[in-house]
Amino acid sequence: MNSPYLAFTISGEPFQLFSLSHLMVLGILLGLIVLIYSFRTKIRQHPIKQYIRYGLAGLLVLTEISFQYWHIATGTWSAAYMLPLQLCSVSLVLSVFMLLRKSYGIYEITFFWGLGGAAQAMITPELFYPYPHFRFFHFFIAHICIILACLYMTWIEQAQPTHKSLWKSMGFLNLLLPVALVTNWLTGGNYLFVSQKPSNPSLFDYLGPYPWYIVSLELVALFLFYLLYAPFARKKQSGKNVEELSM
């Protein structure tokens, strides 16, 4: 592809963390979150919620198809990088099925993986392509849609994770770990970043050297999952206290 916006190699400055374009994307995400939360009751009662649900699922499918096609068109497709085994890639696939089927079972896992992984990716992206390259738009649209899919299910469909959901997410994450390790060994890839740290600045830089940072990452994941679960635990405790007072 000859267009500088579609080329595999870039000639100018690479993506800069917390650059104006990065901050604008974070602002857009925050604005969309505020909108969905503010109008959650009206959306629940309006047919538009179906368009939002299918629209998010469609955007997620489109981003993945376009990403795969871009690598094929540029002759850079490789099993070392393009299999859907990164946490956000798996979350993307799960988000599509979660939205299409309104599946609570998938939601239990995707809520923690999607919000925890995609939010971290939005703040410290593993991205080299700057605005307005295709990969810039692909990366941020995909991650924004993963986050919004989880929030849609929570605020519009009124699904809620439980403490069991948290540990189910951790369990499946650890089942995915050996799959990623074997795949990395076979392909030379770095799925789940368990073979080496990301090249861009990220949370991994504070978790110690390889392979010990994998253990630290487990603890960080557990902490983030509990952080995401905290509002629901507090709500359940508040409801329990009200029930006890009314007895």
Image: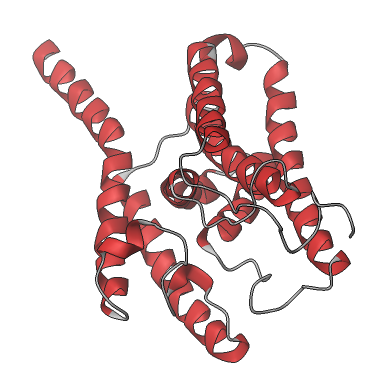
Nearest the camera: 114 or 20? 20
- Measuring 26% from the left and 72% from the top, which residue is drawn there? 215
Give the colour scheme shown. secondary structure
Q: Is residue 54 above or below residue 146?
A: above
Horizontally, residue 75 falls left or right of residue 232, namely right
x and y, in percent, of residue 84 in the image: 64, 66
Q: Kindly indicate the quadrant of the structure image that contains residue 39.
A: top right
Q: Which residue sits furthest bottom?
A: 186
Numbered label tally:
0
Q: Quadrant of the N terminus?
A: bottom right
Across and down, in percent, residue 54 comes to 74, 34
Q: Position of residue 104 (x, y in %)?
A: 52, 43
- Specify the quadrant that holds the C terminus: top left
Question: Which residue is drawn at the image coordinates 39% and 41% (left, top)?
Answer: 161
Q: Position of residue 137 (x, y in %)?
A: 69, 43
Q: Is residue 112 left or right of residue 7?
A: left
In this view, the residue in front, 143 or 109, is: 143
Residue at (47, 33) in percent of width and height: 159
Could you say which is closer to the camera, residue 127 or residue 49?
127
Of residues 76 and 219, the one nearer the viewer is 76
Residue 89 found in image quarter: bottom right
Task: Give the left or right position of residue 233, taking residue 159 as reference.
Answer: left
Give the answer, above or below, for where 101 lies relative to 72.
Answer: above
Q: Residue furthest front?
A: 12
